[in-house]
Image: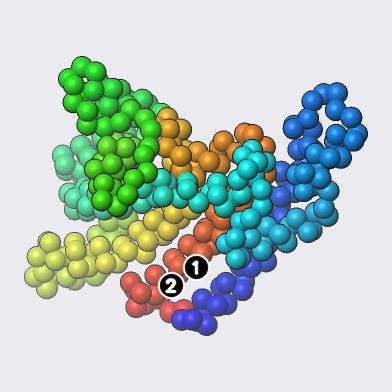
Amino acid sequence: MWTYVLRRVLYNIPIYLVIVLLVMALLRVNDPVTAFLSKNATPEEYALRKHELGLDRPFLVQYFDLLGDVVTCRFHAKSWYRETSTVGQVIGPAIVPSLSITLPALVVSTLLSVVIGLVAGSRRGRRTDRSLMFLAVVGMSISYLVFILLGQYFGAYWLNEKLGVKLFAVSGYEGVGVARWPTRWLYYCLLPVAISVVVSLGYDTRFYRTVIVEQMNADYVRTARAKGCTERRVMLRHVLRNAMIPIITRVMITLPFLIVGSLLLEYYFTIPGLGWTLYTHMTNKDFPVTQTIVALLAAIFILSNILTDVLYALVDPRVRLS
């Protein structure tokens, strides 16, 4: 097992190095120094600003500095947008707000989607199946932004202004101590999490329902029923267990995109998470923060692929890592 993991890590190191190299090169296609100077800047001002941004150093030196920061997790480079802060001071505070939304949304949406997929798959072609799939298609057809705007208006503004019920915040985020964390999380994060779950249900339910239907047509299901197994045992012990590989695949593929995927939620709810941080600093041409976040996302994506293969072997003894 560990030999396989080490081999996969070594195999992906060149891929990761190329990804980071391309990201840094593409960010520098247009000279970033000119964005921080006036139109009538003198050559001396240009040279001074280029030195302040650290762009006068050789490209490979900048490249290996970034790799060193990622490996050591010591992001000491200066932010161009927030000049008094380092990259670590910009990214660090954004991690908790992002995880406060993305992780609960992922767990809840996965559990609900699998359960709904089991129910729909076990009643394939019946009224229950058709109704659930109709709702799933409707959910997929509505824009993410529409769900956010409706949720903000009816879930927060309308309750606050019309009914006087201050249940959810229209926008904002407040980091507080552990003692007040549950209350603050419910007030600031529950509504964005609920919106994210509703948006994900349509796509995930259709996928899991397809997986369940494929497994129910397998020979082992007919054998289990012929032996007298109850329908509940067939679904939970046989169908769901054999459907774990595609379920794990979908969940693990989703992980790296959670940060970017929460951008709309963080933007409209004014939550200072990683998605909002990436958007803000990218639009302000803050290359140190942008390239660091992208490099971290690439590392998470590669590690999630490796972890996916390891989980395959844990949930399915037929899989052998060799």
Say which of 302 and 82 sits in front. 82
Q: Seen from this angle, which residue lies furthest top?
A: 162
Q: Which residue is mark 2?
A: 310
Say which of 182 and 22 sits in front. 182
- Number of dots carrying numbers: 2
Tell me if 22 is positioned left or right of 117 in this view.
right
The answer to whether mark 2 and mark 1 are in CB contact below 8 A is yes
SS at badge 2: helix
- Amino acid identity at mark 1: Ile
Residue sitting at x 39%, y 75%: 313
Residue sitting at x 32%, y 49%: 177
Label 2 neighbour load within 10 Å: few <14, some 14-19, many 20+: some
Residue sitting at x 52%, y 79%: 4
Quadrant hosting residue 315: bottom left
Say which of 257 and 226 sits in front. 257
Q: Which residue is mark 1?
A: 306
Residue sitting at x 32%, y 64%: 244
- Amino acid identity at mark 2: Val
